[in-house]
Amino acid sequence: MADSLLRVEHIAGKGRGLVASQPLKCGQVILTESPLILYSSSPLFPPSSSSSSSYCNHCFRTLLPTTTTASCPSCLTHHFCSNKCLSSSLNSSHSSIVCQALSSLRNSPLLQQQPLQRQVQARFLVALHNLAPSQIDTLLSLHGTPDDSVLQDANFLHDLISPLFNNKLISVDVIAEALAKDRINSFCLMEPYNSDGPQRSIKAYGIYPKATMFNHDCLPNACRFDYVDTTDNDEDDDGPNNNTDIIIRLIKDVDEGEEVCISYFRIGRDYATRKKILMEDYGFVCGCERCNIEATWREDEIDDDVAHVRFLRKYVCDMKNCGGTMAPLPPKHDSSSPSNVLECNFCGNFKISDDHVI
Ligand SMILES: C[S@@+](CC[C@H](N)C(=O)[O-])C[C@H]1O[C@@H](n2cnc3c(N)ncnc32)[C@H](O)[C@@H]1O
């Protein structure tokens, strides 16, 4: 890893992981990364919803009723929040071959009969065909092995999608590997938080190859932020739109050589739910300190004096329907002491903490 703050190491029982290569400060940004691949989470059917008219099909910002949108001149079904996103997209995520492939898939009766998950996998594979060979190699270097169900998906989708990309044949084995990597390594970009609305739904999936090296801990020392809807889109700036970058920030000070972990989901979840998600979605049993303690607890037996209960009180956001993780803002340039302002990585709420060291 090029970033000198972290290095990749083998971690017993976890595979590769990231450890601090120097002492790191609470609140410090330790990684900012753009996606290698980013694709919409909307199924392709019914066609009216397939264009995901509620957000920009390039940067995934939510389209407000007041937003003046631009549409793809060929398919007219992909909408963009600005001319800047339209023109970037026509040269990348919505190139003419991608546009034609998605249009063909939307007319495929065979795909229409498939479960929603396969339709979203089809979107991922169209985006995969749009990557350069070195980017595909990076994707294939990530963790994840196809199981029988992924092999079935790969066989079906290979037959459907390969003919749409005659000039770039990707074998069924590579498709199976890529689907397996996507399942374990993708991060979700979500709808904006709304305390009264339904649960936030997922707008897009992205793979960030460096960030995906972080292992999970139910009491993490770092957490992930994104600012999809809060970063301005400057039409006059020709540079890349960085709103889909993800940022990893430290919740606590970390010693040199210590592993840095994030939580793969909101940290307020109970033991049984965490255990289920980690086994079903990631294939492992968590042996972290918190799980070891909670495995023997009954619901009515929670011990307030345990360090991790104090940690959760402090770092789980208490906004209605939130439960995100609060992390300190980065320390000011001229100060070595950490900020006492905590920001929630789910709803974006801020709170002042008198004491953020536990
Ligand atoms: C996103 S990858 C993380 C990087 C991965 N360790 C690697 O070698 O590339 C997720 C996978 O890492 C492993 N992993 C992550 N956190 C773990 C933990 N706390 N205990 C055991 N395995 C873990 C699991 O195999 C999981 O499916």
Image (cartoon, helix red, strand yellow):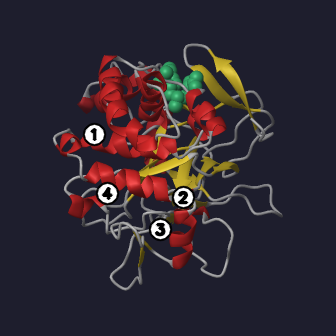
Q: Nearer the viewer, residue 348 or 334?
A: 348
Residue 36 figure quarter: top right
Quarter of the figure that contains the C terminus? top right
Does dot 3 land on a helix, a strand or a loop?
loop
Q: Position of residue 143 (x, y in %)?
A: 53, 25
Mark 4 / mark 3, whichever is N-terminal: 4
Q: At 60% across and 46% down in the image, what residue appears?
A: 251
The residue type indicated by label 2 comes to Thr
Distance from mark 3 CB to nearest ligand 1 atom below 8 Å: no
The first of marks 3 and 1 along the sequence is: 1
**For mark 4, what is the residue?**
200
Nearer to us: label 2 or label 1 = 1
Amino acid type assigned to the residue bearing label 1 in the image: Gln
In the image, is 341 to the left or to the right of 1?
A: left
Q: Residues within 10 Å of mark 1 (few under 14, many from 20)?
A: few
- Mark 2–mark 1 Cα distance, whole angstroms, equals 23 Å
Name the amino acid, label 4: Arg
Residue tagged 2: 244
Q: CA distance from mark 2 to mark 4?
A: 17 Å
Label drawn at residue 229: 3
Q: Secondary structure at mark 2?
A: helix
Residue 207 x/y as whole percent:
52, 42
Tell whether circle 2 marks a residue whose Cβ is less than 8 angstroms from ligand 1: no
Alpha-carbon span between mark 2 and mark 3: 9 Å
